[in-house]
Image (cartoon, rainbow, N blue to C red):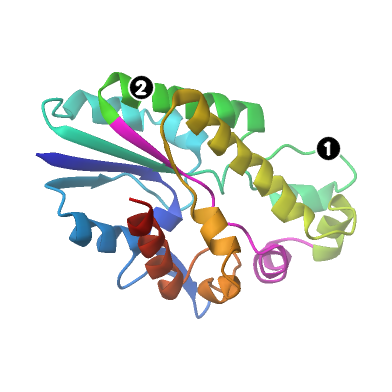
Amino acid sequence: MRNLVIFGDSIPKGIIYEDGRIKKAKVCAVDILIDHYKFDNVKNYSVYGQTLARLTAKGTIDEYLKTVDRSAKNYAAICIGGNDADYDWRTIALSPDESHLPLTPINEYSDLLDCAVKKLLAADHKVFLLTLPPVNSQLYFSNVISRIANGDSVMRFLCGDVSNIYRHQELFNYEVIKCAYKNDVKLIDIRSALLNDIDCYDKYCIDGVHPNERGQSFLADTIINYA
């Protein structure tokens, strides 16, 4: 018996942004992987907009572990952090000259990720951490942030440099890498695979965050090639 559990946000849920609407991809990376590896059971706890802090507060991993069959071969994948690294842009626009924390402060994110990995390892899971897909700062600013908040005000907070969005998210990605090495678990570096692709952002939706259906297929191929 081979079981897979996934803890993530909208990307492993297969959410795409198309024609101004959020919707599920017809075929997402998780669907492709399930078909390829023929797992006996799959539980996908990925949720649109989910942060690691919110997942922890809901006790999702703890509740899952109460029901897990420990006699089976259990695999766990964690792909979450993009929302944790994000900000409340409306609040920032109202006071751009003040300091603001991301939705999950980075030290808290690091501690929660470490705790989640340790819980799954203690329950005899083979754990895989996935790096964060890179955000396209300009697309995200133009097509998401500027539609919900005053773009000029937000740009003051960003010190006139929209690439600060990318660099801030990169800090959270480093925490994923450090956690994998600290706990000696497998790291699947989908971020580097995307950055190494000259056609990278053509695999993204217009929001600069979600891989489109072509991107979802690319993610699946990357994971299969890694394995």
Q: Position of residue 138 (x, y in %)?
A: 73, 68
Q: At 17% from the left edge and 28% from the top edge, which residue is drawn? A: 67
Q: Is residue 45 visible?
A: yes
- Label of residue 119 in the image: 2
Task: In the rendered view, tell whether residue 16 sits above or below residue 110.
Answer: below
Q: Is residue 212 above or below residue 62?
A: below
**Does 3 sit left or right of 27 as displayed?**
left
Q: Quick check: is 137 in the magenta stretch?
A: yes
Q: How many marks?
A: 2
* Magenta-colored span: 126-150
Q: Say which residue appears at 36% left-offset and 62% top-offset.
A: 220
- Identify the image quadrant of the N terminus: top left
Residue 145: image location, x then y, percent: 70, 62
The residue beneath circle 1 is 99
Q: Is residue 80 above or below residue 207?
A: above
**Which residue is at 54% across, 37% downward?**
176
Q: Quadrant of residue 23?
A: bottom left
Q: Mark 2 and mark 1: span between their CA atoms?
A: 34 Å
Q: Quadrant of residue 15?
A: bottom left
Amino acid at the residue labelled 2: Lys
Give the mark nearest the N terminus, 2 or 1. 1
